[in-house]
Image (cartoon, rainbow, N blue to C red):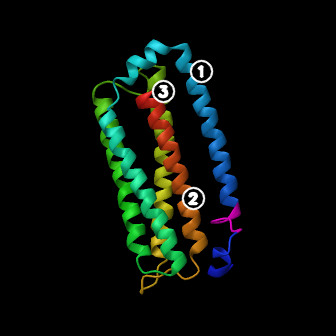
Amino acid sequence: MTTAERRSGGHVPGEEGLWVFIGGDLVVFAVFFITYAVAHRQEYALFEASRRLLDRQLGLLNTPLLLTSSLCMAQAVAAVRRDDRRARPLLLATIALGSGFVVVKAFEYAAKISHGFTLNTNSFSIYYYMFTAIHLVHVLIGLGVLCFAASRFDKAGRMPGGAALIEGSGAFLHLVDLLWIVLFALLYLL
């Protein structure tokens, strides 16, 4: 499909199979969130007390890191579609911001573990570590795909024929960001 055909409308960004994966991921996380909500209702006092042990500042810091990376990614997708040389720097900014999320999450985990808040502390800690670790794996997969995409630029800073790759990468990254927003709200705020 040419760039002109993609712009004319009716185009599904990326590869169609990716959307099946994204849909499946959304279903799995929806089940996770429902399971968490039921457990929260059953152990309300424990969950509320445990939530206070989390570092809202670090969780909040991670939110603009991912949202800004998402903005850079959307701009990178648009730049690739225009055959604009700014696409690669935007993609590298996306990678840097996503890597910042990983670093912050590592510091957060280390601080929690050093204070005795581990996977086995209570049922809330199980949900916290499992959900955030699964999300972190998604971030790392996304970073790997983005690094691969960054390697596909030519010496002139363009990605000929790379629209599907960059669009699919962007769709996956936006999924990861959406999941973080829900996780942040569920685990840190509500």
In this figure, which residue is indicated by the disc labeled 3? 126
Callout 1 amino acid: Val
Q: Nearer the viewer, mark 2 or mark 3?
A: 2
Residue that protrudes farthest toward the bottom in the picture = 156
Magenta span covers which residues?
A: 10-16
Q: Position of residue 93 (x, y in %)?
A: 37, 64
Which secondary structure lies at badge 2? Answer: helix
Q: Which residue is labeled 2 in the image?
A: 171
The 10 Å Cα crowd at callout 2, few under 14, some 14 to 19, many 20 or more, is many
Residue type, mark 2 in image: Ala
Name the image quarter holding residue 87: bottom left
Q: Which amino acid lies under the numbered mark 3 shown in the image of this protein?
A: Ile
What secondary structure characterizes most of the magenta part? loop
Position of residue 165 relative to residue 124, above or below, is below
Residue at 41 percent across and 62 percent down: it is 94
Crowd band around label 3 with a 10 angstrom C-alpha radius: few (<14), some (14–19), many (20+): some
User: Of callouts 2 and 3, which one flags the residue occurring earlier in the amino acid sequence?
Assistant: 3
Considering only vertical position in the picture, is 150 above or below 27? below
> Where, by quadrant of the figure, is residue 165 drawn?
bottom right
